[in-house]
Image (cartoon, rainbow, N blue to C red):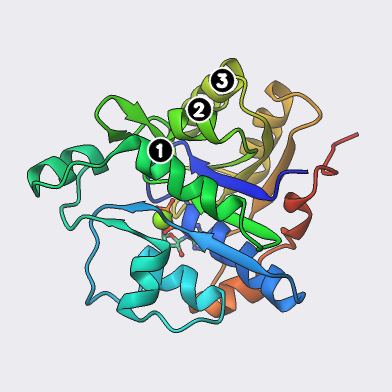
Amino acid sequence: MSRGIFITAAGTGVGKTLTTSALAWQLARAGRAVLALKPVVSGFSSEDPDSDPAVLLRAMNREPTQDAIAEIAPWRVQTALSPDRAARLEGRPIGFAEVVAFCRQAIDSHYEHVLIEGAGGVMSPLAGTRTSLDLVVQLQIPVVLVVGTYLGSLSHALTAFKVLEISGVAIRAIVVSDSTDGVGLAEAAATIAAVAPPAVEILPLPRLAGALVEKWRSAPDLTHLCHPTGRRS
Ligand SMILES: Nc1ncnc2c1ncn2[C@@H]1O[C@H](COP(=O)(O)OP(=O)(O)O)[C@@H](O)[C@H]1O
Ligand SMILES: [Mg+2]
């Protein structure tokens, strides 16, 4: 059984970090050795206490020191553009093979569970013409696809699902994260469930209130996503 899970999304800002951090927090609470990574992060500021790497570290009960951030997120660019463009603008292009090797090494390490949060959406350019999709195809690990419920989200969700499916990626679950001003969580989840095969779990994530740790506490249990048993009847 693969111990790596890749968390990708139909777009940006839909709930990847929330899903990854809630899952990391729940696994850590259950006494599991978990490592959450954000290999490539754009729009990063070391001053931001809620940057993706800082949030993931807190979810693992680790201090978000600069060293710890560098360890789980080696490719950090400040410009809030797609990683490839941002990295080129900053004069430090990202090497796709190096990102693959970094993730592979983590997956093969002693951790029971390795959660890898992608950058942006499933086809956000990562390095040259390579996208998160290419990364997950190379890694051959299952994905959790996070989608929203904003107006227009269904087409984004089903497009992302389809491209993963035709690329032969194992889709462990689709997390339907209720957007601010969402147009209906239950309806969105039902529509996606009607399209996705029964082996793909559809997991509605309601709009959670409070600080991050309160969101992790009140999130539905996600730990079964790390085991290939989540099936709908
Ligand atoms: N279901 C939800 N309930 C409450 N807040 C959410 C939910 N989904 C996303 N958010 C919030 O929306 C913002 C963007 O989500 P985030 O997980 O950072 O997205 P991504 O990692 O995909 O860019 C964060 O502040 C996050 O906590
Ligand atoms: Mg994120």
How far apart marks 1 and 2 lie (CA) works out to: 8 Å
> Residue at (33%, 67%) from the top-left corner?
70
Decide: few, some or many residues near mark 1? Use Cα within 10 Å; few <14, some 14-19, many ≥20.
many
* Dots 1, 2 in contact, CB < 8 A: yes
Image quadrant containing the N terminus: top right
The answer to whether residue 172 is above or below residue 72 is: above
The answer to whether residue 107 is above or below residue 71 is: above
Is residue 189 found left or right of 229 in the rendered image? Answer: left
Residue type at mark 2 is Ala
> Residue at (61%, 21%) from the top-left corner?
165
> Residue at (60%, 51%) from the top-left corner?
107
User: Which quadrant of the structure image shows residue 197?
Assistant: top right
Residue type at mark 1 is Gly
The answer to whether residue 40 is above or below residue 137 is: below
How far apart marks 1 and 3 lie (CA) works out to: 14 Å
Q: Position of residue 192 (x, y in %)?
A: 65, 30
Q: At numbered mark 2, what does the secondary structure look like: helix, strand or loop?
A: helix
Instruction: Provide the residue designation for mark 3.
Output: 162
Q: At numbered mark 1, what does the secondary structure look like: helix, strand or loop?
A: loop
Instruction: Provide the residue designation for mark 1.
Output: 121
Q: Position of residue 100 (x, y in %)?
A: 44, 40
Q: Is mark 2 within 8 Å of ligand 1?
A: no
Dot placed on the residue nearer the N-terminal end, 1 or 2: 1
Residue type at mark 3 is Lys
* Dots 2, 3 in contact, CB < 8 A: yes
Q: Position of residue 128 (x, y in %)?
A: 24, 29
Image quadrant of ligand 2? bottom left
